[in-house]
Amino acid sequence: MLKKYIKNTIAFLPYYLSGKTNKGWCPVCESKVFFVKKADWLRDFYTCSNCNSIPRQRAIIVALNTFVPEWRNLQIHESSPSGPASALIEKECSNYIPSQFFQDIPLGKSKDKFRCENLENMTFEDKSFDIIITQDVFEHVMNPAAAFKEINRVLKPGGVHVFTMPWYPHLKQTLQRARLVNGEIEFLVEPVYHGNPIDSKGSLVTFDWGIDFTDYIYINSGMFTTIYLVKDKKMGLDAKFLEVFISRKLEN
């Protein structure tokens, strides 16, 4: 433990001396910490000195605490979890089911600690969960209309989908970047890939979501969506694409 502390202190010192840190309180590890700006792209490089969380991970915990403060006692499914926020939710919620989509095992079966699920065609029964969480997933879904419909199906009445994704409100219409045609990917614009914790090839970006995305969700699922944005350096909340979206299933 002491060696780890010394190593972290040495790594942190140059940022502190160059003024690229600020004191604050991390909503993920619930500790007084320094937030460290390791690069100009804060979304991935504005980290907590204690748990190494990044802004969107801290933002989703703040959103959960704000909109569903009793989340620890509810039924939660998270698709493609990763990072300190997912680790916190798994630790604190006993009714938490994480999933990944694996090409090599049947849907509904498990690999390691993850259940194999496809958001476009989930194996869960109707009205299974109070909360569904996705962190930076919906820019990679090939058929989001089907996925939003499925999320609405497996949520309990009044349940919520809490999620992050890059959002481009200057786009009047969402841009589809790729689609499936006869089982093959057709690129509609130059392909872009993001990192994928279970696939070294990365994840293809399929949609750049525009200002119309809340209408898209309502049309395809019946859920109403709230856009939640907090910027507060004291909680390490400062970056682009920091919005958290909360889509709620109707009560009846």
Image (cartoon, grey):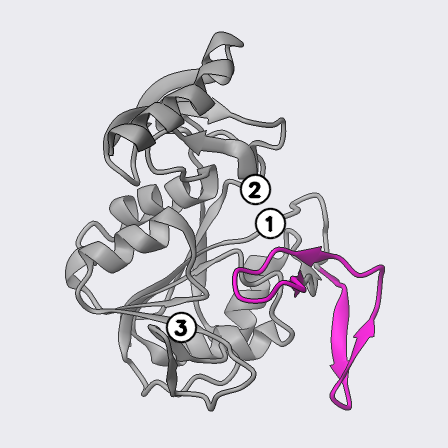
- SS under mark 2: loop
Q: Residues within 10 Å of mark 2 (few under 14, many from 20)?
A: some
- What stretch of residues is rendered in magenta? 175-203
Instruction: Measure the alpha-carbon separation of dots 1 and 2.
Output: 5 Å
The disc, 1 or 3, on the residue closer to the chain's N-terminal end is 3
Instruction: Measure the alpha-carbon separation of dots 2 and 3.
Output: 24 Å
Q: Is residue 63 above or below residue 94?
A: above
Q: Residue at x 44, y 84 (%)?
A: 122
Asked if disc 1 and disc 3 are in contact, CB closer than 8 Å, the reply is no
Residue 21 lies in the magenta stretch: no
Asked if disc 1 and disc 2 are in contact, CB closer than 8 Å, the reply is yes
Return the residue nearer the eye: 71 or 192: 192
Q: Residue at x 54, y 34 (%)?
A: 45
| Amino acid at dot 1 | Pro
Q: What residue did someone put label 3 on?
A: 99
| Amino acid at dot 2 | Phe
Residue 197 lies in the magenta stretch: yes
Asked where in the image residue 239 lies, by quadrant, the reply is: top right
- SS under mark 1: loop
Q: What residue did someone put label 1 on?
A: 166
Q: Residue at x 55, y 72 (%)?
A: 219
Q: Residues within 10 Å of mark 3 (few under 14, many from 20)?
A: many
Q: Residues within 10 Å of mark 1 (few under 14, many from 20)?
A: some
